[in-house]
Each structure stands twice: as structure tokens, then as C-alpha cells.
Image (cartoon, grey):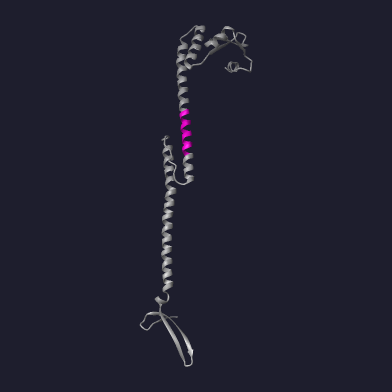
Amino acid sequence: ELAPGINGERVVSTYVELGEPDWAVVVETPILEAYQELIWRLGVSTVVLLLVAIFAAVAGIFAARRLTAPVLSLTSTATRIAEGELDLEVQPEGPTEIVRLGTAFNSMNRQLGDLIDSLEQRIEARTQRLETVANLGERFLSILNVDELLAEMVNRIKDTFDYYHVHVYLLDNKGENLTVAQGAGTAGAEMKARGHSIPLATTHSLVAPAARTG
């Protein structure tokens, strides 16, 4: 039991009765001495727990930074790309999943850039064609002779668009056949020379449906 000692110090005491005569043996030990090993073990356990907690906190901070830094970098790059900086690339680093995500993002961005370049080239080519057609139209309007107009048309179109041959078909008076009226290039000249024609009603032709539908 706990009890005050002779000089007021807290002690742990116990006793054993001896029987006859009516004596007993009493033992008293200062509380710090009695529980010295327990107190030491408690101290060691407290220090160990504190060290473990510190290590866990440091490891958690390190892991969080290692995970969040690449994600923040990826987010920042994606935002800049969305704002128009299409030549940027993510630097894949960090955990395997983040590296895979960054690699996939770079691949997607390259495909997007190729698509945009392709569209720009197609738009530019179409714009040039429209400008060419407009210029040709102005030239053709100044020619009044039909034969001269058709010859000028096929030759200008062939040279301008770099086609290997160009034909012009005219519908005959009966409205039944389309006949080559003018041709540019070797194939065009040969087809005109032999009077090549296509029935207007045929289905195995690109020319006939174009003529039927206007």
C-alpha cells in the first residue's frame, strides 16, 4: 500500500505477521525506487512512440509532396495548353501511375496538335482553291466564244490545280448523251478526238449523276 514514510516521502509498504510474540515485519520502499523499472519502461515507450509519430509525420509529408507535386505540374501544364500553348509537354515523374498519365497526356496533346495542323493546312488549301476559282471565273467571263472559253477553261484548270487531264462534257440536243466538248492533257485530247460520250441515264459514272442533278 501507499503511505507516507518517516520523513514525509511517499513510500510503498507491506508487512508480514510473525505470530507469537505479536510481532510483524514491515518493509517500506520509496515509490520512485519501487517503480523505477516501470517508470523507465514507460519513459522508453513514450520516447519510442514520439519517434514513431515524428517519422510517420515526416514520411507522410514526403509522400504527399512526392504525389502532389507531379499532379500540380500536370494540372498547370494542362491549363497552359488549354490557353493555347500547344507546344508544351508534361515532364513525367513521380509514381508509376503519374508517369503513365503524363505520357498519355503528351501523346494526346501531340495528336491534337497534328489534327489542328492538318485542319489549318486543309483550310489554307481550300481558301487558295476558292481564290483560284474566283480568279478563273473573272477570266472566263471575259471570253464570249464558247469553243475558246472551253479550251481556256480546261487548260487553266489543269495547270492551276496540277491535274493530269481535264474534260468538259456537253449535253447533246436530244438530252440523252454527254459528249466531250473539250479536253486538256493527253487523255483529254484523245477522248475529244474519238468523240467519247456517256449516256445521261447511266449509273456507272460520276459525270452522268452530276449532269442529272445539276
- Number of marks: 0
Quarter of the picture holding the C terminus: top right
Q: Is residue 28 above or below residue 52?
A: below
Residue 206 vs residue 75, the one in the foreground: 75
* Magenta residue span: 105-118
Q: Is residue 203 magenta?
A: no
Residue 184 appearing in the image: no
Dominant SS of magenta comes to helix
Residue drawn at (47%, 47%), measured in percent from left and top? 95
Q: Is residue 113 magenta?
A: yes
Looking at the rendering, which quadrant does residue 47 occupy? Answer: bottom left
* Extreme-left residue of the structure: 7
* Extreme-bottom residue of the structure: 21
Quarter of the picture holding the N terminus: bottom left
Residue 119 vs residue 2, the one in the foreground: 2
Residue 48 appearing in the image: yes
Residue drawn at (48%, 42%), measured in percent from left and top? 101
Residue drawn at (51%, 12%), measured in percent from left and top? 154
Give how far across and how far down residue 107 sits, in percent.
Answer: 48, 36
Give how far across and how far down residue 152 sits, in percent.
Answer: 49, 10
Residue drawn at (41%, 38%), measured in percent from left and top? 80
Looking at the rendering, which quadrant does residue 79 occupy? Answer: top left
Left or right, 174 with respect to 114, comes to right
Give how far across and how far down residue 38 sits, in percent.
Answer: 44, 72
Give how far across and how far down residue 173 sits, in percent.
Answer: 60, 8
